[in-house]
Image: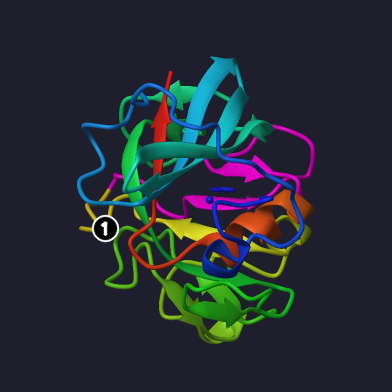
């Protein structure tokens, strides 16, 4: 699937290329009771069909602050769904970790573990294989999983991408390869996609423990 700030303090947040300003103390956001101790939240709210709005939040001692709002976002061609399912091009609702990142481009400076990918990098979508829903490196003819059911990561949409922690338990049929990635301007196969420049800015800000929260 194709399938995530004039700042509170620029030195701390590392938001380099998009000017943002804290809103000075908005009401508690919709996800406030769902993200545990997370202090960085990427909020994605459907605006209908395969479109959504992304807002970026930071939790501080004063409460939640919005760092940027109204980012145009693309989601699955079937919109959003209550949960992920294999072969269903809908973006699953819920709160998911943002644990790692990758891309065909070099690391842009994210605080997350980053892998630069090439032609031999795959994300296994073979739910009959122990590799299911993990990144693998192999030549196509030698991969120990079905490449037809998987995704090669050497594509323009993955110039930069953050892995969403969907189906971490690798439940067969529960979907694989859900990413927050560079948009090609159209709907995704279940991922979340925005323009690359804004994505890079967000990636530079992200630190371990960040989450993405998705809802209608």
| Residue 179 on the magenta span | yes
Label 1: element kind: loop
Where does the C terminus fall, quadrant-wise? top left
* Residue 86 makes an appearance in the image: yes
> Residue at the spot x=78%, y=44% of the render?
184
- Tell me where residue 196 appears, x and y as whole percent: 75, 53
- Tell me where residue 109 appears, x and y as whole percent: 63, 76
**Pointer 1: what residue?**
168
Q: Nearer the viewer, residue 187 or 139?
A: 187
Height in image: 83 above or below 104? above
Which residues make up the magenta segment?
Answer: 173-195
Prevalent SS, magenta region: loop
Q: How many marks?
A: 1
Q: Residue furthest top?
A: 48
Q: Nearer the viewer, residue 155 or 128?
A: 155
- Tell me where residue 169 appears, x and y as whole percent: 20, 58
25 vs 2, left or right, is left
* Residue 76 makes an appearance in the image: no
> Residue at the spot x=39%, y=69% of the render?
134
| Residue 150 on the magenta span | no
């Amino acid at each position: 699937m194709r399938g995530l700030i004039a700042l509170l303090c620029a030195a701390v947040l590392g938001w380099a290329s998009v000017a943002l300003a804290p809103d000075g103390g908005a009401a508690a956001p919709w996800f406030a009771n769902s993200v545990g101790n997370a202090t960085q939240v990427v909020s994605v709210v459907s605006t209908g069909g395969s479109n959504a709005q992304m807002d970026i939040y930071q939790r501080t001692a004063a409460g939640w602050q919005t760092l940027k709002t109204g980012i145009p976002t693309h989601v699955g061609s079937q919109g959003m769904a209550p949960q992920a399912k294999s072969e269903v091009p809908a973006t699953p609702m819920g709160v998911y970790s943002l644990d790692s990142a990758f891309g065909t481009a070099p690391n842009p400076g994210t605080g997350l573990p980053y892998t630069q990918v090439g032609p031999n990098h795959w994300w296994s979508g073979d739910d009959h294989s122990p590799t299911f829903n993990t990144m693998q490196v192999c030549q196509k003819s030698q991969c120990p999983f079905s490449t037809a059911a998987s995704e090669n990561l050497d594509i323009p949409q993955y110039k930069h991408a953050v892995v969403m922690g969907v189906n971490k338990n690798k439940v067969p049929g529960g979907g694989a390869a859900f990413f927050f990635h560079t948009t090609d301007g159209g709907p995704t196969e279940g991922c979340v996609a925005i323009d690359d420049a804004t994505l890079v800015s967000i990636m530079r800000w992200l630190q371990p423990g960040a989450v993405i929260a998705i809802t209608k």
